[in-house]
Amino acid sequence: MRGVRHVAIDNNGAVLVESLVKPTTKIPFDATRVHGISDAMVSHAPTWPELWPRLEPIFAERRIAIYNADYDLRLMQQTHLAHGLTWQTAISQFCIMKLYAQYRGDWNARSGSYRWYSLDDARWQCHLEFPNAHRAKADTLLARAVLQYVAAQKA
């Protein structure tokens, strides 16, 4: 993983884990420009193998809601592989992005599924006052707000 920040929150928005991750390579300039994380910021951060033991129990003990779950889980699996770790975690998860797409109901005949929206588009469409700061905590809280918005509309 290239200088990412991992955040896990519970149902109430309390932070369970928040940490930068020290990458195995330098962070590309374009990535730093988007998310604001520099090589200097991650120089003393834990590596993925050091952080995973804190994350794994959270994933193993809960049903996890993730915006664009396929992407995030694929990156975690690739990172495991890059570090020589075996991916054995059975993660009970659902994708907020796919749930939101179904809620919006815009059918995409070409893909044969509902149209997916970026987290920022979902924020605007739901009239949520959360920043999309391309920072893990802000994005995690925004994803939670989108999930709560959809749940409130369905109630």
Image (cartoon, helix red, strand yellow):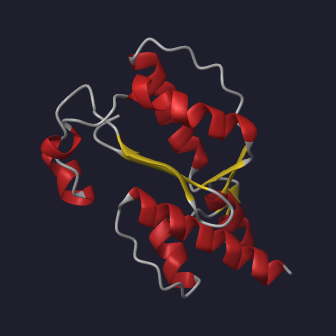
Where residue 63 appears, as percent x and y from the top left, is 74, 47
How many labels, in total?
0
Where is residue 11, by image quadrant? bottom right
| 124 or 41: nearer the viewer | 41
Q: Is residue 27 above or below residue 143?
A: above
Where is residue 150, by image quadrant? bottom right
Is residue 117 among the parts visible in the rendering? Answer: no
**Residue that appears at 28% across and 31% down:** 23
If the image is split into quadrants, where does the N terminus sit? top left
| 21 or 128: nearer the viewer | 21
Drawn side of residue 155 relative to residue 78, left or right: right
Where residue 82 appears, as percent x and y from the top left, is 39, 18
Drawn side of residue 33 relative to residue 153, left or right: left
Where residue 13 appears, as percent x and y from the top left, is 59, 65
Is residue 47 among the parts visible in the rendering? Answer: yes
Where residue 84 appears, as percent x and y from the top left, is 44, 11
Drawn side of residue 84 relative to residue 91, left or right: left
**Residue that appears at 47% across and 35% down:** 75
Q: Is residue 96 above or below residue 155?
A: above
**Residue that appears at 86% across and 81% down:** 155
Drawn side of residue 75 relative to residue 44, left or right: right
Q: Is residue 111 above or below residue 139?
A: above
